[in-house]
Image: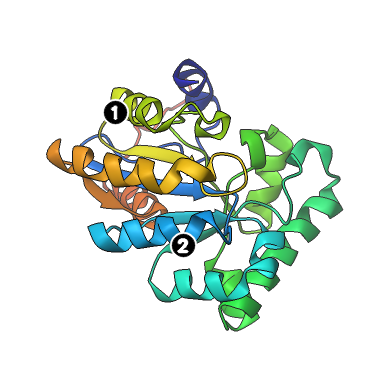
Amino acid sequence: MPHLYRVLQPTFPDCLWAGMSDRPVVALTFDDGPHSRYTPDLIEVLDRHAVTASFFWLGICVDRNSELAHEIWQRGHWIGLHGYDHRSFPLLSSIELQQSLAQTQRAIAQACQLDLADAQANIRDVRPPNGLFTPQILRQLRQWNYRPVMWSVVPEDWASPGVAKVVQRVLAQACNGAHIVLHDGFCGGEDVAATVDRLIPQLLDRGYEFVTIDELWRARSIAACDAPPKPETRPQ
């Protein structure tokens, strides 16, 4: 998976794959929730370590666990979209994809007691299920005012390799700006709280600070603004 990341990242630069490499920061992100059994334990661990994370929710899970979703929102964690259900985006028509994302925004707005217009304006980070997308899908996401988000560290926790193995994989791949994806849903969620409880202190010991996906976007935007202008090319 790290090799695939290195190949795809320069090919699709409009996606957020990682943060800037000049700061010792990492983003903890979680897909497929909220889950009634696994997510509360995860939130307790994050609270104990005072870490703010980013969650990419399935709309159907938000509808099933609306009070839990509201609690996570109230605690200040960053929220993104993972589609209404877990269907891969390339399998959806353009209309189905747009409806899936809009339906998820509506579910989040209702659960978190937000004005729908505010949810549409602010909850617009999208991570495709299974990491599958096409150039056309990326163009559509941008056209619809969404921000496509991927990853740089994927320890494949959904296959349940065990807490020690997931922690080992994350630490082996972690670097400045690392964008770590774990799962608090049906696949992988059983170990997520124990994994994060072990992982956070070790990342802190290595000097990393935890940031949200929004902070990675803002740092990238600032870096782009600070970059020197490209030299003008004139026809010969």
- In the image, is residue 72 above or below residue 226? below
Q: Looking at the picture, how far across and down is residue 20, in whole percent? A: 29, 39
Disc 1 designates what residue? 171
- In the image, is residue 32 above or below residue 136? below
Q: Secondary structure at mark 2?
A: helix
Q: Looking at the picture, how far across and down is residue 159, in whole percent? A: 57, 29
Residue at 58% x, 49% y: name it: 185
Question: Quadrant of the rendered structure where residue 57 is?
Answer: bottom right
Q: Secondary structure at mark 1?
A: helix
In the image, taking residue 77 as reference, residue 145 lies left or right, namely right
Q: Amino acid at mark 2?
A: Pro
Q: Amino acid at mark 1?
A: Leu
Residue at 52% x, 19% y: name it: 4
Q: CA distance from mark 2 to mark 1?
A: 24 Å
Q: Looking at the picture, how far across and down is residue 26, in whole percent? A: 30, 43
Residue at 40% x, 49% y: name it: 193
Q: Looking at the picture, how far across and down is residue 209, in whole percent? A: 21, 48
Question: Quadrant of the rendered structure where residue 112 is?
Answer: bottom right
- In the image, is residue 215 above or below residue 154? below
Can the viewer see residue 50? no
Foreground pick, 94 / 213: 213
Do tag 2 and tag 1 residues touch (Cβ < 8 Å)? no
Foreground pick, 109 / 158: 158
